[in-house]
Image (cartoon, coloured by chain):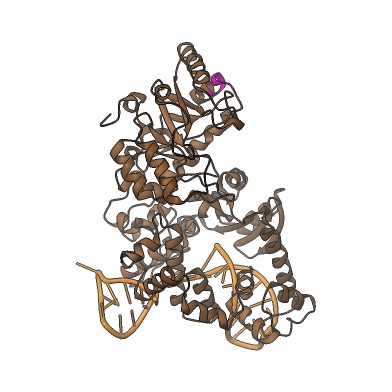
Amino acid sequence: MQTIADYLDLDGQSTYRIIAYEKAAALFREHPISVAEMAQQGGLRRLPGVGEAIEKKVLEYVATGDIEFLARLRDRFPEGLLTVMRLPGMGPKKTKAIHEQAGVADLRDLERAAREGRLRDLPGMGAKTEENILRAIETWTAVAAGQDSGRKLRAAVEPQAIKFVEALRALPQVAAADFAGSLRRCRSTVRDMDLVVASLDPEAVMAAFATLPELARVEAQGETKLAAATYTGLNVDLRVVPPDSYGDLLQHFTGSAEHNVALRGYAQRRGYKISEYGVEPVESGRHIRCATEAEVYELVGLRYIPPELREDQGEIQAAEVGMLPDLVELPDVRGDLHVHSDWTDGRVSLEQMALAARDRGLDYLCFCDHSQSLAMTGGLSPERLMAQQAEIRALDARIEGIRLLSGIEVDILADGRLDLPDETLARLDFVTASIHSGFSQPPARIMERIVGAMRNPCVRSVAHPSGRLINRREGYEIDIDLLARVAAETGTFLEINGFPDRLDLTAQAARRAAALGARMVVCSDAHSPGDFENLRWGVGEARRGWLTKADLANTGAWESIAEKRPGH
DNA sequence: GCCGTTTTCGGCCCGACTGTTTTCAGTCG
């Protein structure tokens, strides 16, 4: 669908037609359950933004593996042009022009033409354009070489964003400063950093900002807007507005683009025009500036929508009728049920982990080291596990202020058996099961393994259910509906693993699972004291999944978890 | 292409910056 959208863009088709395909592409990409199956069951049309034409194309693709409409587009334009079009600074118009007038069919052609100065004579282009194109190709090549997916983990970017915000807030001319964009929405990965500032002296703010040592270069600068790049290869956009319209700017640049489109559409139907500079009742034409985001939403008749929900996933309708969820917050998490120690691949002792957890204010902590088949990590045999349990019990008696529990992250073996006998598992306080091998099995087989584990009465949760590693490995294809139903039926929890490159379950999957009655746990999977920060990333993902305190099991006391599961 | 407490047709978010086009198109977010 995305490829069709790109081709239509190149072909100069109606933007709304293009947007329709892009919306469908985004919808399918993020959709937690199989789009192909939904299509076959005739349920695709129920999805917002899917109509007759797109449904037909999906069905055609499912049946034949191709789409004739797309094949015809491919015949008309070389595929390499799509890459050219995605270069920053290039768009459909320029791409089409260089294709038709300079014979460029792919990136290599473009590079040659730019080097030979053959582009500067085309309408709308000059020497500067060629220079920009060559730079863009260089960056693109570096990214494509694989060391960089272009999207960085939120956890890697946020500390730098906080530094920038602190530097801005320290300026005397600055009334307020925040980071916005996908970072503020707690997306697991971000492409760039958006900074917004309230000030009456944008010139001074931008001048001071441009001197920060983290910035490699300033790429563009206007009166209120500055674009720069950091040495870490991150693009930073800075926008400055007067304090009385700070709320408008923050709202606008927090996005998402989809949320803003939906919000503006909603506002327009009620007679308002929203931009980053204010809210305008169309009738009066009077421009109302908002110092806070809450005012923006309030003016058009909505409750305040937390940034994590701003993805055009029904939040506007929910805000309209006062049905927004009361999202879980980090302090709600009372215990961590999945951490490691130096008994396997953790880096510090049981005691150090326990003290770190207590310092973070947790009420209970369950050690779930690896089981024996993960030899690489020094996985625990039944004997060593019992020895560890004895040490945990002794530690629990000695350390005040936190309850220490003995558990295991037991491997679900390739044949579906668990890596430890039931009689061993039955002696533990908590058991989480997970897959570390047999990733390439057919999805249905993997589901059988997970579901089989969940039906074992000793197993209390499933750790990192999809096995994905962001930027490194796709997860195995999980059937979240099936997992959620079995979870609800057996009282097994599904983990939201807080590791920055896992965040697994994803927000979308967690939201679906909660809707089907499953309960989740947010865990750090910490291997060292610093990893307890993972709880923060995990809670961010949970919030993006619309989860409330009640959807998570470890927001309650340990006693509420310790109880036997229903039916066992 | 999608969609409907303004509509089955006529809408669909909006403004800044760049580069070069002397009045604005293209791109971006």
Q: In the figure, B18 relative to A159: above or below? A: below
Q: Position of residue A398 (x, y in %)?
A: 48, 11
Toward the front, the furthest residue is: A415
Q: Is residue A207 visible?
A: no
Q: Which of A13 and A264 is in front in this view?
A: A13
A149 horizontally vs A315: left or right = right
> How many numbered circles does the render carry?
0
Q: In the figure, A482 relative to A417: above or below? A: below
Considering the whole magenta stretch, tell me its main secondary structure.
helix
Colour of chain B, in one word, is: orange
Q: Position of residue A538 (x, y in %)?
A: 47, 40
Residue in view at x 39 percent, y 50 percent: A479
Q: Is residue A385 visible?
A: yes
Magenta span of residues: A349-353
Residue in view at x 75 percent, y 71 percent: A131
Rendered image quadrant of residue A365: top left
Q: Position of residue A393 (x, y in %)?
A: 46, 14
Toward the right, the furthest residue is: A116
Residue in view at x 43 percent, y 47 percent: A445
Q: In which quarter of the image is the C terminus of chain A?
A: top left
A48 horizontally vs A114: left or right = left
Question: Is residue A163 in the magenta section?
Answer: no
A347 horizontally vs A397: left or right = right
Q: In the figure, A266 relative to A511: above or below? A: below
Q: Position of residue B10 (x, y in %)?
A: 34, 83
Q: Nearer the viewer, residue A370 or A356?
A: A370
Rendered image quadrant of residue A483: top left
Colour of chain A, in one word, is: brown
A275 horizontally vs A198: left or right = left
